[in-house]
């Protein structure tokens, strides 16, 4: 407490805590197609009465083929939307049991150019076949979206040919609309990272390797069965990423947004979503290359979050699901399930700074998002709205007892289905007891800018290094490190007081400054804001600020007893106000001066700490004064 008071005593000229950019403003407002407060009815009427057998056949042999249907929502009809079946295991399992509740991919403008459904050209409806609660993807989405661009999720009731087919999970498509929404551009390289393998036992079906980012050579055809290109171009971009990752890792930040990847991996692990790159199975993610040349990792298909069914009964022990190693993949010799190389997680976790950053992200997610009460409230609200839709769903795999019971508890049938809340509680207990996660990070209690915007300060403790990570990049990427000092230099006022300072970088740029503070000690890392780099502080350019603002006031002597000489730069001899402020920021004395020197007499100033401020028309200088 004493140190914080001292901060305000020495820095009364600092502005308020900095403004944080919150990317969650990019998500839809209530009332749209992904509205969380309603469970709408969608009606599909196919023009071909034999649509089901036709679409099943297409799934096996021509999976991109669509047939037309009329879609109706809220009484509005949309003619000739393009429909196909989608999915892999979630298609095969019901289809093998002659159940028609399979997943749908609906392209609103496939046949009618420009046609949209509440602003969207495509919707994807998952059948929640392996989620008795219908809520796991929804609950997972609410967590992912805090830390990286993620698809939105809600529930809808689907009717086909006039009959109720069942309750479905409506998941936002990763397409140009999604890209434009989150990155304000949409023309870059986009890959869905799933191989061509089919869950069904199809005769002579093609096979591929997992999309694990292992380097196979420069021939793009070697990657065709392992990655699904969704843009008009991009194989050379993907190979460049993979080559750099495997053969020139020191250059990885030139091709990959490392921080977004670390956030994706951290959320996967905290919420026990193991159907992912750094879990049991290597797939279920997208890669998009933004205009800054960096690939972004985008999560996908999180229905197996909170220990999903794909873990299977054989793996259902605490040591394999609740106590799954959050650093799994760091040593490829220890990978026992689907033992393919995972160079991305291995390389990142064997880099000391990236590993600390990943661990910091784990701590943040555990602290912010593994709240069983908050998650339970979200799920309860969703299930209450969807209850009738689930009750009348005669095609669902599980009972209504499972619908409610699996929220709190794991259930066991032919596979194990983790409970949402039981997984949160068990996973949180394990992660908080993990020796590496339990290492003590630094603290960052305050980040501020000087009122003239030229100095950025942070109060930090238990640190070895403090850095300002800053960029003027439009994509909030390619942050550069600038050392912050607590030694009385580089804008710092007092050495050793726990207040670290740095002169504002990119001061001549006309772009918005985006930044966060990164503090490290030998064991751990802390970020401010904690969700950096997805969130960050920002401030406007220093428009019209004179270079004099980068200067300081010289006070001789300091400390002073009876009087002192003040010197500052004022080459144009403009009018300035010299102000003396006490430790609370209260103005005690003010003088008008047209020179660059002044004699300050002690007068009625008692012994203590003060701030001398020189304020010109377009600059402001400040310095500490000690009176004895």
Image: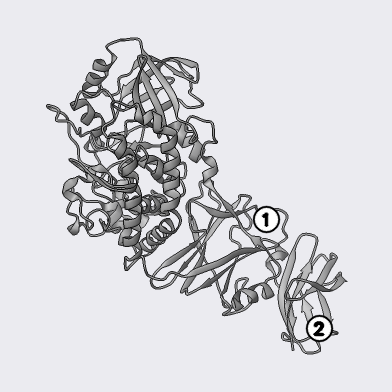
| Quarter residue 223 falls in | top left
Estimate the x, y position of residue 87 in percent, counting from the top left.
28, 31
Which numbered dot is residue 542?
A: 1
Q: Residue at point 81% right, 89% down?
A: 562
Q: Quadrant of the C terminus?
A: bottom right
Disc on the earlier residue, 1 or 2: 1
| Quarter residue 401 falls in | top left
Q: Which residue is nearer to you in this view: 350 or 588? A: 588
Q: Residue at point 23% right, 28% down?
A: 94
Q: Is residue 173 among what the camera can see?
A: no
Task: Determine contact: label 1, label 2, CB under 8 Å.
Answer: no
Estimate the x, y position of residue 624 in percent, counting from the top left.
70, 77
Q: Quadrant of the N terminus?
A: bottom right
Report which residue position mark 2 lands on.
Answer: 605
Q: Which residue is nearer to you in this view: 389 or 20? A: 389
Between the residue at mark 1 and the residue at mark 2, the CA separation in whole angstroms equals: 35 Å
Q: Which residue is nearer to you in this view: 155 or 51? A: 155
Q: Horizontally, is 3 left or right of 521 in the view? A: right
Which numbered dot is residue 105?
A: none
């Amino acid at each position: 407490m004493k140190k914080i008071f001292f901060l305000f005593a020495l820095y009364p000229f600092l502005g308020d805590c900095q403004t944080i950019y919150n990317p969650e403003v990019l998500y839809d407002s209530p009332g749209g197609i992904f509205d969380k407060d309603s469970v709408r009815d969608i009606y599909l009427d196919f023009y071909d009465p034999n649509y089901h057998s036709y679409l099943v056949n297409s799934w096996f042999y021509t999976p991109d083929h669509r047939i037309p249907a009329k879609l109706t929502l809220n009484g509005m009809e949309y003619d000739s939307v393009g429909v196909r079946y989608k999915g892999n295991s979630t298609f095969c399992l019901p289809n093998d049991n002659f159940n028609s509740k399979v997943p749908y991919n609906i392209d609103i403008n496939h046949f009618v150019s420009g046609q949209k459904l509440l602003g969207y050209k495509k919707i994807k409806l998952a059948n929640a076949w392996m989620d008795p609660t219908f809520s796991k993807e929804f609950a997972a989405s609410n967590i992912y979206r805090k830390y990286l661009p993620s698809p939105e999720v809600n529930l809808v009731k689907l009717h086909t040919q006039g009959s109720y087919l069942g309750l479905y999970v409506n998941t936002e498509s990763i397409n140009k609309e999604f890209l434009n929404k989150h990155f304000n551009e949409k023309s870059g390289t986009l890959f869905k990272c799933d191989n061509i393998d089919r869950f069904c036992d199809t005769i002579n079906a093609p096979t591929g390797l997992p999309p694990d980012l292992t380097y196979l050579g420069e021939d793009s055809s070697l990657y065709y069965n392992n990655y699904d290109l969704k843009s008009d171009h991009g194989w050379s971009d993907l190979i460049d990423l993979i080559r750099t990752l495997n053969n020139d890792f020191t250059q990885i930040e030139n091709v990959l947004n490392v921080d977004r990847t670390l956030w994706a991996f951290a959320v996967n692990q905290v919420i026990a979503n193991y159907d992912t790159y750094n879990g049991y199975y290597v797939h279920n993610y997208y890669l998009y290359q933004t205009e800054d040349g960096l690939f972004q990792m985008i999560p996908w298909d999180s229905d197996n979050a909170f220990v999903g069914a794909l873990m299977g009964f054989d793996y259902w022990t605490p040591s394999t699901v609740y106590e799954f190693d959050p650093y799994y993949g760091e040593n490829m010799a220890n990978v026992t399930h689907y033992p393919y190389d995972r160079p991305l997680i291995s390389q990142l976790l064997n880099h000391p700074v990236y590993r600390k950053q990943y661990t910091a992200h784990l701590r943040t997610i555990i602290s912010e998002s593994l709240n069983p009460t908050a998650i339970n409230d979200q799920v309860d609200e969703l299930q209450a709205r969807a209850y009738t839709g689930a009750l009348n769903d005669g095609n669902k795999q599980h009972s209504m007892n499972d619908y409610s019971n699996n929220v709190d508890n794991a259930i066991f049938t032919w596979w194990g289905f983790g409970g949402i809340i039981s997984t949160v509680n068990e996973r949180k207990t394990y992660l908080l007891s993990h020796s590496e996660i339990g290492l003590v990070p630094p603290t960052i209690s305050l980040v501020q800018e000087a009122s003239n915007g030229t100095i950025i300060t942070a109060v930090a403790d238990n640190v070895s290094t403090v850095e300002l990570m800053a960029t003027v990049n439009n994509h909030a990427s390619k942050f550069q490190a600038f050392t912050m000092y607590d030694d009385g230099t580089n804008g710092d006022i007092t050495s050793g007081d726990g207040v670290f300072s740095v002169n504002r970088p990119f001061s001549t740029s006309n772009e918005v400054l985006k930044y966060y503070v990164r503090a490290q000690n030998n064991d751990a890392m802390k970020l401010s804001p904690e969700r950096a780099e997805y969130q960050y502080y920002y401030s406007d350019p220093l428009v019209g600020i004179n270079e004099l603002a980068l200067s300081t006031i010289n006070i001789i002597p300091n400390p002073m007893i009876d009087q002192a000489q003040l010197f500052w730069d004022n080459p144009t001899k403009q009018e300035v106000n010299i102000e003396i402020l006490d430790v609370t920021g209260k103005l005690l004395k003010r003088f008008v001066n047209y020179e660059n020197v002044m004699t300050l007499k002690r007068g009625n100033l008692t012994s203590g700490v003060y701030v001398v401020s020189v304020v010109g028309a377009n600059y402001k200088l400040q310095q500490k004064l000690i009176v004895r």
